[in-house]
Amino acid sequence: MKKIKKICCIGAGYVGGPTMAVIAKNCPEIDVTVVDINQKRIDLWNHNNLDLLPVYEPGLREIVKETRGGNLFFTTEVDKAIDEAEMIFISVNTPTKTYGKGKGQAADLKFIELCARNIAKVAKTDKIVVEKSTLPVRTAEAVKSILDNTGKGVKFEILSNPEFLAEGTAVDDLLNADRVLIGGDETKSGQEAKDTLSWIYEHWLPKERILQTNVWSSELSKLVANAFLAQRVSSINSISALCEKTDANVAEVSKAIGFDSRIGSKFLNSSVGFGGSCFQKDILNLVYIAKSYGLNEVANYWEQVIIMNDYQKRRFADNIISTLYNTVSDKKICFYGWAFKKDTNDTRESAAIYVADALLEEKAQIVVYDPKVSEETIYADLDYLGTRSPEENRKLLKVINDPMEACNDAHAIAIMTEWDEFKNYDWIAIFELMLKPAFVFDGRRILTKEKMNAIGFKYYKIGQS
């Protein structure tokens, strides 16, 4: 096993930034350089004000403060970092394709391929290349074939090291990982590369939690883990619709089945729907792979998880419209939360985007307050959908930095993210500020029905009649 002194990570996003910070903290003898072609993002990682880091994760600013400039570096000098590194992590975005074959399901691998071609162009010495993005099965094979055909006599070992980070707890997930998966070739040099990556993680994790597999098993395990978790969320959300019709309470149902040790209690919280960069993308990927092998029944089964998630978001929006006397035109609706879940500033696939889009189609006036998401991000999310012109989005939706101002003269509040601060608001004061009857639609089930009704709100909690 080879001990290494220099690591480079291509991609300074939600995976690359926190992962490299934790490696730098626990491996003081290794220089870790994170590179990205996005100058603005790198400037934020290097900013003196640590509250401006581009990724918000509890515990991250403290680790960056401790390691940055010591053995953790952020730069746009991609080629220099690739040239000097012995191990290169590829941690770039792999969005779902929006064009051509596999549109709407397959992962778009153009950024991964650009990385591989850049490594091939620059590398003069042997490298271990680690794919850290969420990728479809057989990506390592594609990366390997690009790298092996450079004709420079440089030897590359390709490893798959999928991330299992939950945003909002990413730092803790890295420091106390359930397991680390390392997939690589089952050759002598492949084994040596796997052992080298394992040695890095062994700085802070017990060896028995570091699993070595072949590349395909590692890649597929990531997709399947996310698919299983998303399937649990969609399953309990399907029951939430039934609960609302039958006077059952989805929290009581969740608790009852969660006590069954074969099922367990995690990922059984009903909500307005799951979001985030991974669940939907990975399931669609699984669907695409299954279809490409002619396994249509398998594809249809997993696609249903996405359909149920879309239904939950649509159902929530429809309920707001029908409750507000079948029209929201020119009515002010205040959104508390835009991030896909608490303790992150990530909004990818957030339920709030799709619920807002549905209400804007009905000419609602929406005001958004989120403690960590910027106005720029919120408008970018809406513009990306292409439902309306950017000008119209800015006319119909406003972003306000004060939760009390946001709800002033509102017909309704929709709770879209389960930020802890929302539970502690002065809801009596909020009631006074709103138009009457004052409606609250709790898409995250964080408030108490009895308390809200006692104040005077018309209160709807997802999964309860």
Image (cartoon, rainbow, N blue to C red):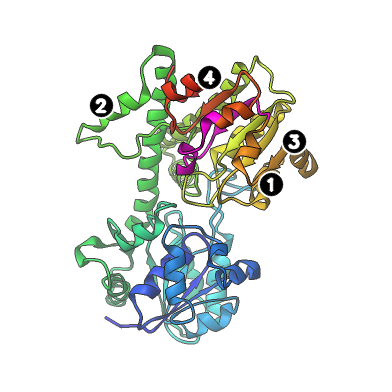
Drawn side of residue 240 relative to residue 122, left or right: left
Check residue 216 in the rendering and tell me which mark sits there, or answer none: none
Tag of residue 456 = 4
**Label 3 belongs to which residue?**
396
Q: Considering only order in the chain, which callout, 1 or 3, is on the residue closer to the N terminus? A: 1
Give the mark nearer the N terminus: 4 vs 2.
2
Looking at the rendered structure, which numbered label has been put on residue 256? 2
Amino acid type of the residue tagged 2 in the rendering: Ala
The answer to whether residue 160 is left or right of residue 105 is left
Quarter of the rendering occupied by the N terminus: bottom left
Image marks 1 and 2: residues in contact by CB distance under 8 Å: no
* Viewer-closest of 271 and 106: 271
Q: Dot 2 surroundings within 10 Å: few (below 14), some, or many (20 or more)?
A: few
Q: Nearer the viewer, mark 3 or mark 4?
A: 4
Span shown in magenta: 409-428
Find disc 1 in the rendering and name its residue.
Answer: 379
- Mark closest to the chain's N terminus, 1 or 4: 1
